[in-house]
Amino acid sequence: MPKNSKVTQREHSSEHVTESVADLLAHEEPVDYKRSVLNVTGEGWDKQKDGEEELDAENRPAWNSKLQYILAQIGYSVGLGNVWRFPYLCQKNGGGAYLVPYLVLLVIIGLPLFFLELAVGQRIRRGSIGVWNYICPRLGGIGYASCLVCFFVGLYYNVIIGWSIFYFFKSFQYPLPWSECPIVKNGSVAVVETECERSSATTYFWYRETLDISNSISESGGLNWKMTLCLLVAWSLVGLAMIKGIQSSGKVMYFSSLFPYVVLVCFLVRGLLLRGAVDGIMHMFTPKLDKMLDPQVWREAATQVFFALGLGFGGVIAFSSYNKQDNNCHFDATLVSFINFFTSVLATLVVFAVLGFKANIMNEKCVVENAEKILGYLNTNVLSHDLIPPHVNFSHLTAKDYNEMYRVIMTVKEGHFKELGLDACLLEDELNKSVQGTGLAFIAFTEAMTHFPASPFWSVMFFLMLINLGLGSMIGTMSGITTPIIDTFKVRKEVFTVGCCIFAFVVGLIFVQRSGNYFVTMFDDYSATLPLTVVVILENIAVAWIYGTKKFMQELTEMLGFRPYQFYYYTWKYVSPICMAVLMTASIIQLGVSPPGYSAWIREEAAEKFLFYPTWAMAILISLIILASLPLPLVFILRQFHLVSDGSNALSVTYKKGRMMKDISNLEDNDETRFILSKVPSETPSPMPTHRSYLGPGSNSPMEMSTAPNGRYGSGYLLASTPESEL
C-alpha cells in the first residue's frame, strides 16, 4: 500500500482522517463488524465522550437474576389500586360481568403496549428520555413528560404510604384505637365525642385523629405534625431503597413484592372462615350482564388497565433497560400482565369476603336497634301485639324474622309508617354501599378488622401490606425519574436520588396540612390521567408509524430470536392507537361533564359534602394538566425549527482505529452511496444474521428493508451493535 495513502496516515497518526467511502472501502481490510460501530449521533467524534459512552454501556447496572427483575416489575405494577380501586369498579360495573371488558381491554391495549415499553427499554438500554430521543427526536418530549407525571404522582402517592405508616404503628395496641368512640369530659359529666357519635369510630379516627381535616380546601389549618413525621419516614424509606439504584431497590423487591401475596392469602383464608363472607363474594361475582353494554363501564375498565400496568410513567422502560438484550421480554410482558390481573381478582375476593362479614355485623346491629324501637311502640300501645307473628322471639331475633315483622307493620300502618322511623335492615343494602380508595382501606376495612379475633395482629399485617404495595410502586415511579435523568445528564446517582427525595418531601408538605387530603384528591384525579393518555398515544405512534412497525418487528425478531405474533403488528399499528384515542376523547368529555370538585368532611355535620373547587384551586388543577403535557409541544417546536440539536444532521463518514463514526457531512454522491448499499451482497459483509427476518404482514422479501431508511436518520444501512445504535 502506498506510504502516502490515507489509510497509512491513519495507522501512524492518532488524529482521525475523513475520507470518501469509496477510498475507505477500496483500501481497507475487511471490517470486524462486531467491533466496528456506526455512530449516528450527528455530532463530531469526541474521543473522551465516546469512551465514556462505551464504558457506560458496558458497565450499566444489571439485575442479579431474572427473578429479581420480574419481582421488580410485579412490585411496580401491582399497587394500591389493585386492592382498593379494582374491587370497587368490579362491584360498581356489574360484578363478574366487569371481568369480561377488563380482560378484553387487557389483551388488546394493556399487553401490547406493555410489551412495547419493555422492548424499547431493553433494546436501547436507556431511560424514557433517551429512548424517545432516539426513536423520534421531535417527540423527545415524551420522556420529559413522563418524568413530570412521575414526580406529580410520587408527591401524593408517598403521602398515602405515610398514612399507612401511621396506622401501622397505631395497630400495636389492644383494643385498636379506632374501635370505640373517645369519651370527653364536659365539666363533671363524661360524654361521647359528638362528631364520633354522629358518624362512627373508624370514620372519626380517620378524619379527626389521623388527618385532623379542615372543612374545605380553602382552610389550610397549618401542618399536621404527625403526618409530616410519617411523610418524612416514607421518603426516607424510598430514598434508602433507591440510593444505589437497582443494586439496592432490587433487594428490597424480594420482600416488598412477595409479602403482599402472603398477607392476601392469609386474609382470604381468614375471611372465608368469617360468618357472611360467602354473602360478600356471591354479591361480588353475581354478573349484571346489562352493564356490559354501558360505554362508561368500558371506559373505566380501559383506564384501570392503563394505570394498573404503569404505562407511560417510564418505570417499565427504566426497569427493562437493565436487562440483557437477548432477554425474552415478550414472556415477561405476558407473565406480569396476567399476574397483575389475578392479583386484582385475589384482592377482590379478600375485600368482599371481609366486607360481607362487616355487612352481616352491621345488619345485625340494625336489626337489634329497630327491634328495640318496635318493643317501645308495643309498650306504649302505638303498635298492637297482634301485628307480631307468634313465632318471633325478641331475645333471639333473626334478620328473617325482623323482615317478616317489618313487612306486616308496613302493610298495616301504611299511612303512618314513615313516622315510626323503622329501617328495612336488608343485607343487600349493606353490600351495595360502594367504597373505594382511602374510604375502603382506612374506614371500611379497619372497621371490619375490629371484629376479628386478635384484631391488632391483622391490622399490623394489613397496613404493612399497604406499605409494601406502595413502596414497590414508588420505587418504579422514582425509577421513571432517576434513570432517564442520570442516563441523559450523567449526574451522580446517589446525589440526585437524595436531592430528589428531599425536594419532593418539601413540596409534599402541601399534602400534610389539615386540608392536605383535598390536594391528594386533586392530584389523583387530574395530574396524571389526561397527560399519560397523550404520552402513551404518542409512544405508540412513534414506534408504529414513525419508526415503523415492520422495522420494529424485524428488530424484535433479531433481539428475541423468534418472530412475535402478527397480533402485535396489528394492535400496535391500528387497534391500540384507535382505542387510546377513544379513551382520551372519553376522558376529556368526562372532565367537561363532571364538575371539578371534592368530598369535604364537615365537622359540625359529621358528614361528607361535595364542594366545588374555588377559582385558585381550579387554576392549580389546570396548571397541573398543562405543565405535565408542556414538554410534548415544547420539544417538538424546538427541534422542528432547529432551535436545539436533534442529532439528525446530514451524513459523512469518519474512520478512527477500527471504529466507523457518524461525522457523515455531505454524503450526496450516488456512487459512494452505492458502495454502502452494495447491489452485490458479497461486496460488503453484512453484520446482521443470515436468517430471514420478519417484516410484518404483506412483505414479500426479507431484503425489502435493505434500501429503506434505517432508524430515525434514514441512512439506509444496518447499524452495528451498541446500546446507542440499536432498535
Image (cartoon, rainbow, N blue to C red):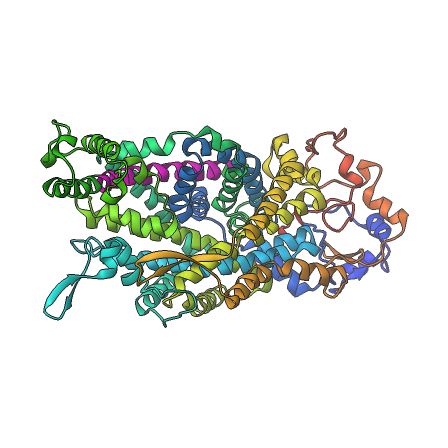
Nearest the camera: 280 or 553? 280
Q: Residue at x 38, y 31 (%)?
A: 285
Residue at 66% over, 60% down:
50
Task: Please determine whether, in this image, residue 285 is positioned above or below residue 524.
Answer: above
In the rendered image, the vertical position of residue 413 relative to residue 455, given as above or below = above
The verdict on residue 491 being magenta is no
Q: How many labels does the image show?
A: 0
Name the spot of residue 318 as percent of width and height, x first.
53, 52
Residue 444 vs residue 613, the one in the foreground: 613
The answer to whether any part of residue 420 appears in the image is: yes
For the magenta stretch, what is the residue range? 334-363
Q: Nearer the viewer, residue 566 or 506?
A: 506
Residue 344 painted magenta: yes
Name the magenta segment's main secondary structure.
helix
Residue 451 rendering spot, x and y as whole percentages: 20, 45
Q: Farthest top residue? A: 391
Q: Residue furthest bottom?
A: 222
**Residue 293 horizontal/vertical position (percent):** 53, 32
Q: Considering depth in this image, is 369 or 76 the residue closer to the camera?
A: 369
Residue at (13% x, 43% y) in the render: 376
